[in-house]
Image (cartoon, helix red, strand yellow):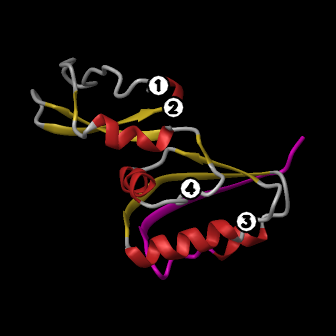
Amino acid sequence: MAHVTRFALAGVLDAGAPLEAFGTIPRGRLELDLSGVRRVTSFGVRDWIEACRRIPAGVTVVWERVSLPMVAQLGMVANFAGSAHVASFFAPYYCPKCDADVPVLLTPEAAPDGAPARSCGTCGTALRFEELESDFFAFLR
């Protein structure tokens, strides 16, 4: 069985983010739970790309539960994901009845042609996708 290293990142991805450990992954698979990343600064983008470059060759990198700020960077910054595979990500939906933003966890397989229809877990109303689909899902192509 392959060795699996798992990290969960939370807070602000900025110049002070502790990303040194990426370069110490011995082998196997690196799974990153990115659901807790609230914001990404320009210094964070720079340091993130550099940290991803330090991941040793042969390590399979999987991003899970990618937060909305991280998805935004995927669409704007070339090579932001490096060689990583995005397994799941949050997409921005809105419930007009509850007047609430509803981040919905999706997989690439669930969104081959854009935002799938979803209903509010509170009231059952059809949710509205809150971004331009062609831009938001561009990172999947």
Q: Do the CB atoms of the residues marked 4 and 3 lie less than 8 Å apart? A: no
Within 10 Å of the Cα at label 3, are there few (<14), some (14-19), or many (20+) other Cα atoms?
many
Quarter of the rendering containing residue 137: top left
N-term mark: 2 or 3: 3
The residue beneath circle 4 is 81
Q: What is the CA distance from the residue labelled 2 to the residue labelled 4? A: 15 Å
Horizontal and vertical percent for residue 107? 50, 31
The residue beneath circle 2 is 108
Q: Do the CB atoms of the residues marked 1 and 3 lie less than 8 Å apart? A: no
- Residue type indicated by callout 4: Ala
Query: Of 122 and 93, which appears nearest the observer?
Result: 93
Residue at position x 35%, y 42% in the image: 136
SS at mark 4 in the image: loop
Q: What is the CA distance from the residue labelled 1 to the residue labelled 2? A: 6 Å
Horizontal and vertical percent for residue 43? 43, 79
The residue beneath circle 3 is 55
Is 133 colored magenta in this rendering?
no
Within 10 Å of the Cα at label 4, are there few (<14), some (14-19), or many (20+) other Cα atoms?
many
Q: On the rendered image, what quadrant is the N terminus found in?
A: top right
In the picture shown, does residue 59 fall above or below 50? above
- Residue type indicated by callout 1: Pro
Q: Do the CB atoms of the residues marked 1 and 2 lie less than 8 Å apart? A: yes
Horizontal and vertical percent for residue 2? 87, 45
Q: Do the CB atoms of the residues marked 1 and 4 lie less than 8 Å apart? A: no
SS at mark 3 in the image: loop
Left or right of 93 on screen, residue 110? right
N-term mark: 2 or 4: 4
Residue at position x 47%, y 62% in the image: 10
Left or right of 25 on screen, residue 104? left
N-term mark: 1 or 3: 3
Is 12 colored magenta in this rendering?
yes
Q: Which residues make up the magenta segment? A: 1-19
